[in-house]
Structures are given as structure tokens and as C-alpha cells.
Image (tube, rainbow, N blue to C red):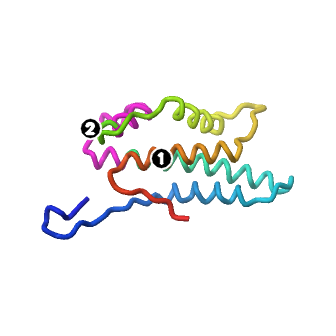
Amino acid sequence: MSLRGLGCCDVSVTYYCTILDDANFFINQAKGLPVVPSASPLGDRYIRMGILCSWIALEEMLEISIEEQGLSRAARRMPLRDRLDLALTTLGRDPLEGRAFMEAREVRNHLTHPHANGQPASLEEAASVFDFCFGTIKNLFRNEVRVRF
């Protein structure tokens, strides 16, 4: 999105994603809690929300990227991994590293498909998922993507 072709000065575009800001907020809130038993339920809630908001942001920004690139509507029906790889390679970027995607997805899947005796996600896992999603989002656009703190 540049006005260069109109004879005007260059205009830089910066993307903000509110739900990504929320993910960052929740993870930072979890980091700031004291390590006492009474704070544990709140910390677990912040961690869950940080993970889920990170993934929601990734899917939201992927849809925007697909639309901006003019990719076909059929791309929207592809599995998430395939849509991400299509959007990235269309921009001339490398496809996702499989291991990082699978690890981040596994953390999300433990939340969306819980096991009876599963352990809650850790703060480190939440931060890793956020970093993966944010890094991928930044690669989906030619322009800058920022998180507001």
C-alpha cells in the first residue's frame, strides 16, 4: 500500500492486530504474577488466553494476507499449514519450518482437546507459541507488523 505511483512521497504501512496485542498482554500478565499457590489459577488462565489469542491472531492475519495477495477463494478451504505455506511462498518467503509449526500446534491442541489428566501449559510454552505466531505473521506481510504493549 504505497502512494509512490501517484507521485507522492512514500507512505509506510504498519499493521496492528488487536488480538495479537491481547495475546502479548495475557502472557506478560502471567509473567508478572508472584509464584504463590493462590496466583496459580489466574496464571493458568492468562497462559491459556495468551496461547489461544496467538493462534486466533495468526489465522486472522493469514486471511488478510491471502486477501491482499489476491489468492483464490479456494485457498481459504485449504488446511491451515497449506494456507500458510501458500501465502508465504507467494511473497517469496520460505515455507514454515515443520517442527516449529507442529510444536506450537501441539500446545494449542492440548488446550482445545484436553485430556483428563493433562498438565496445564507452561509460561515458556505460551511464550514460544506467541513468538512462533508473531514471527509467522510478520512474514505474511511486506510491511511492518507491530505489537502494542
Residue located at (70% from left, 51% from top): 45
- Residue 39 quadrant: bottom right
Q: Residue furthest bottom?
A: 8
Q: Which quadrant does the C terminus fall into?
A: bottom right
Q: Which residue is mark 2?
A: 72
The residue under label 2 is which amino acid type? Ser
Residue 113 pos. (x, y %): 64, 34
- Where disc 2 sits, the SS reads loop
Q: Residues within 10 Å of mark 2 (few under 14, many from 20)?
A: few
Q: Is residue 58 left or right of residue 43?
A: left
Q: Can residue 70 be found in the magenta stretch?
A: yes
Residue 7 placement (x, y as % from top left): 13, 68
| Secondary element at tag 1 | helix
Q: Residue 89 location in percent, x, y?
A: 32, 36
Q: Which residue is mark 1?
A: 135
The magenta span reads 64-88
> Quick check: 134 above or below 97?
below
